[in-house]
Amino acid sequence: MKRLIFAGTLLLASGTASLADGLFWVVGNRATGKCNIVTSNPVIFGDVWFGDGPYKSKADAKLARSTIRACPAPTPDEEKDEDSTN
């Protein structure tokens, strides 16, 4: 019975970790005064003052970032750099 419970717990833990793959969050960075799109669930501490998400695609995260009042509009150069890194 203990083996079955252990196997179920292991299966559940690995399943939830794989669900986070391919998701995006919008994160406000106090140090830079910008909002970034990241691929890992943010920890709200220190310079990170908010995190919004998860979103299923980067396009959804960009749309959400444009609607958040605390996020300044990214410059065209920043958008180009962001698109080339991902």
Image: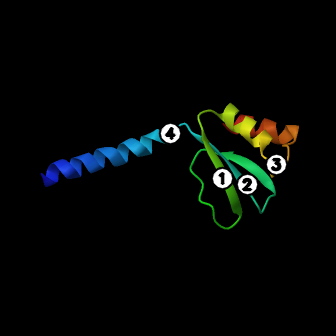
Q: Residue at x 62, y 44 (%)?
A: 53
Disc ID at residue 51: 1
CB within 8 Å, label 2 to label 4: no
Q: What is the distance, in whole Å, between disc 4 and disc 1 at their CAs?
A: 17 Å
Tag 2 near tag 1, CB within 8 Å: yes
Give the left or right position of residue 48, taking residue 3 as reference. right
Q: Secondary structure at mark 3?
A: loop
- Relative to 42, say whether 55 is above or below: above
Identity of the residue drawn at 56% across and 51% down: 41
Q: Secondary structure at mark 4?
A: loop
Mark 2 or 4: in front is: 2
Q: Name the kind of residue labelled 2 in the image.
A: Gly
39 or 16, nearer to the observer = 16
Q: Locate residue 78, reporting x and y percent.
A: 82, 42
CA distance separating discs 3 and 2 = 11 Å
| Residue 12 x %, y % | 33, 45
What kind of residue is marked 3?
Arg
**Horizontal and vertical percent for residue 55?**
61, 38
- Which residue of the protein is positioned furthest toward the left in this rendering? 1
Q: Which mark is residue 1?
A: none
* Label 4 or label 1, whichever comes before in sequence order: 4
Q: CA distance from mark 2 to mark 1?
A: 6 Å
User: Which comes before the other along the chain, label 3 or label 2?
Assistant: 2
| Residue drawn at point x = 46 percent, y = 39 percent | 19
Label drawn at residue 28: 2
Give the crowd class for mark 2: few <14, some 14-19, many >=20 residues within 10 Å.
Answer: many
Residue named by callout 3: 69
Quadrant in which residue 62 is drawn: top right
**Could you say where residue 68 lies in the image, as x and y percent from the top left?**
78, 46
Q: For mark 2, give the secondary structure.
A: strand
